[in-house]
Image (tube, grey):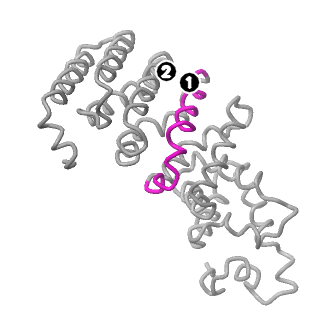
Amino acid sequence: MDPEEQELLNDYRYRSYSAVIEKALRNFESSSEWADLISSLGKLNKALQSNLKYSLLPKRLIICKRLSQCLHPALPSGVHLKALETYEVIFKIIGTKWLAKDLFIYSSGLFPLLSYAAMSVKPALLTLYERYFLPLQRALLPSLQAFVTGLLPGLEEGLEVYDRTDALLVKLSVLVGQQVFYGSLWGSVLISPLVRLPASLFIVSHFDRTSTAHQQRYMLGSDHRLVMKSVCMSLQDSNVLVQRNMLEILLNFFPLYSCLVSPPYHTLSALTDFPAEKHIL
């Protein structure tokens, strides 16, 4: 238990606040319809705001469990929106310090949401990310790959939130460092087949053809074996659009004509500043 939390437990007002929240949480146990969940979330919101003196929430693990359950894909958008409203209430109360410390418990329910949320829910979720997650900056690093994986479904072509998601990802890359960001992006490509298309599209669309590949080597991250594995997996992907994007990435960063004028692997080595033999598959 956090020392600050242990100290607060000696405060009778904090214990009273905890009891109020615990009472509100019991409403979820008797919820059998989605309308009941909306009512329970409203009561929880009131309980959370009953004592704004404390930035450290009591019962936060249970709170996050209930909120995650309210974001289940089978539930209607009204429940999702009410749950996001509760998240915002919490983030306003706890501030960046406690959000950074407890990011893993709050993000577990939020990060998967964009992939299946209704169109009315997506903007509200992106607003939470813009207001409360981006200000964490490098405190996002432990959860960065999961965050990137959660954002990439917003890059589906034709979605109303495409441009907004793209801008959010660009800003995130600046805040955490572009090389670190792209390293997480390639990690998502390797382990999450469902985001390969938007991830490859993001790389292709942000490659500046007026600059050299060497100047944009940050787009390959720092682990070039990871990049090669991700490219190879993507070239075997069943989605032809993923294959096409990866071929374009290969042509951008590893142009075939270079082998006609350079020693073997020279282009790759110059691009990455790593010894050539490290990139032989």
Q: Secondary structure at mark 1?
A: loop
Which kind of residue does numbered mark 2 sit on? Leu
Say if 71 sits above or below 3 in the image: above
Relative to 194, 251 lies left or right: right
Residue type, label 1: Val
Residue at 48% over, 38% down: 112
Residue 121 versus residue 86: which sits nearer the camera?
86
Q: Quadrant of residue 231?
A: bottom right
Cα distance, mark 1 to mark 2? 6 Å
- Reading the image, the residue beneath label 2 is 81
Which numbered circle lies on residue 277? Answer: none
Image mark count = 2
Q: Main secondary structure of the magenta part?
A: helix
Task: Kindly check if marks 1 and 2 are in contact, taking CB atoms under 8 A apart as contact.
Answer: yes
Looking at the picture, tell me which residue is in the foreground, 98 or 220. Answer: 98
Q: Quadrant of residue 173?
A: bottom right
Residue topped by disc 1: 121
Q: x and y percent of residue 238 in the render?
A: 65, 50
- Who's the residue at 56% across and 71% down the image? 223
> Which badge, 1 or 2, is on the more N-terminal residue?
2
Residue 211 among magenta residues = no
Secondary structure at badge 2 equals helix
Q: Residue at x 39, y 14 (%)?
A: 38
Crowd around label 1: few <14 · some 14–19 · many ≥20 (10 Å): some
The residues colored magenta run 120-142
